[in-house]
Amino acid sequence: MIELTLYSRDGCHLCEFMLEELHRLYGAQISVTVLDVDSRDDWRQLYGLQVPVLSYRGQVICFGRPDRAALRAVLAG
């Protein structure tokens, strides 16, 4: 199972869409930890209005919308 991190914000429709798409496309292949970007000043400064930000092992995979090519590369490992 691939463990991903999604930096999100409450009430963000793009964040909700990203999470739904990830589960729809990859289901049991992935585990997604959702972190509130507004819960820490450093995350808020780093990601600002770029949310949602999806990362794998500390590296940003994509932001805004799912990047299927980048996700396939991570899953292919």
Image (tube, rainbow, N blue to C red):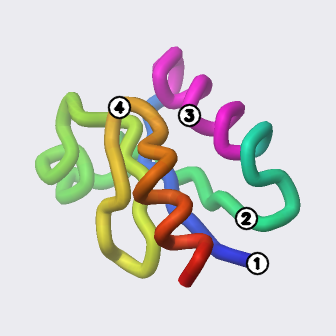
Q: What residue does disc 2 label?
A: 30
Q: Quadrant of residue 9?
A: top left
**Disc 1 to disc 3, how far (Cα)?**
18 Å
The residue nearer to you, when weighing 63 against 73, is 73
Mark sitting on residue 47: none
Which is nearer the N-term, disc 2 or disc 3?
3
Determine which residue is flagged by label 3.
Answer: 18
- Distance from the alpha carbon under mark 2 to that under mark 3: 13 Å
Q: Residues within 10 Å of mark 3 (few under 14, many from 20)?
A: many
Amino acid type at circle 3 is Met
> In the displayed structure, would residue 16 be above or below residue 69?
above
Mark 1 and mark 2 residues within 8 Å of each other at the beta carbon: yes
Contact (Cβ within 8 Å) of mark 2 with mark 3: no
Q: Residue 64 — which label?
A: 4
Which stretch appears magenta? Answer: 10-22
Which mark is first along the chain, 2 or 1?
Answer: 1
Q: Earlier in the sequence, mark 3 or mark 4?
A: 3
Query: Viewer-proximal residue, 7 or 61?
Result: 61
Q: Main secondary structure of the magenta part?
A: helix
- The residue singled out by tag 1 in the image is 1
Whether 64 is among the magenta residues is no
